[in-house]
Image (spheres, helix red, strand yellow):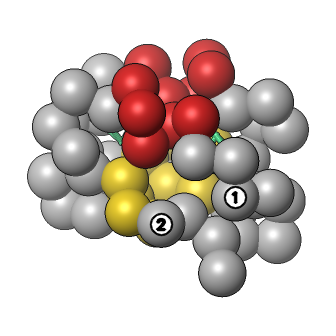
Amino acid sequence: MAYVINDSCVSCGSCAGECPVSAISEGDGKYVIDADTCIDCGTCAAVCPTGAIEG
Ligand code: SF4
Ligand code: SF4
């Protein structure tokens, strides 16, 4: 089960730069995680300022 970014995302971009497998990209109005690429490390959730990433 991959991590998911919810609507609390403010598109700051912090998570994308921290992902070790580059699974995060900018989407329409918020960032999105590619479920097939995510390895569930949790790094993105730890750096998100709004708590928008759920695992
Ligand atoms: S949980 Fe890890 S691998 Fe998955 S999107 Fe976040 S930083 Fe990337
Ligand atoms: S760190 Fe959080 S608020 Fe920033 S782009 Fe990622 S999910 Fe959105």
Observer-nearest residue: 34 or 1?
Answer: 1
Which residue is labeled 1 in the image? 40
Tell me if residue 6 can be seen.
Answer: yes
Asked whether the residues under the numbered discs 2 and 1 touch, taking CB atoms below 8 Å apart as contact, a structural biologist would say: yes
Q: Which of the 4 image quarters holds residue 50?
A: top left
Q: Which element is circle 1 on?
A: loop
Q: Which mark is residue 3?
A: none
- The answer to whether residue 10 is left or right of residue 15 is left
Q: Disc 2 designates what residue?
A: 55
> Which quarter of the rendered image does ligand 2 occupy?
top left
Q: Residues within 10 Å of mark 2 (few under 14, many from 20)?
A: few
The reply to whether residue 29 is in sight is no
| Rendering coords of residue 54 (x, y %) | 38, 63
Left or right: residue 22 compared with residue 5: right
Neighbor class of circle 1 (other Cα within 10 Å; few <14, some 14-19, many 20+) is: few
Please tell me which residue is depicted at 47% across the width and 66% down the height of the picture.
55
Task: State the image coordinates of residue 37 (x, y, percent, origin top left).
Answer: 83, 59
Query: Is label 1 within 8 A of ligand 1 (CB to nearest ligand atom)?
Result: yes
Q: Amino acid at mark 2?
A: Gly
Number of dots carrying numbers: 2
Label 2 C-beta lies within 8 Å of the nearest ligand 1 atom: yes
Q: Secondary structure at mark 2?
A: loop
Q: How far from the left and from the top, in percent, is residue 9?
A: 23, 45
Q: Quadrant of the N terminus?
A: bottom right
In the picture, residue 6 is in which quadrant? bottom left
Q: Amino acid at mark 1?
A: Asp
Q: Which residue shows up at 61% across the image and 18% down it?
A: 17
- Viewed as shown, does residue 41 lie left or right of 49? right
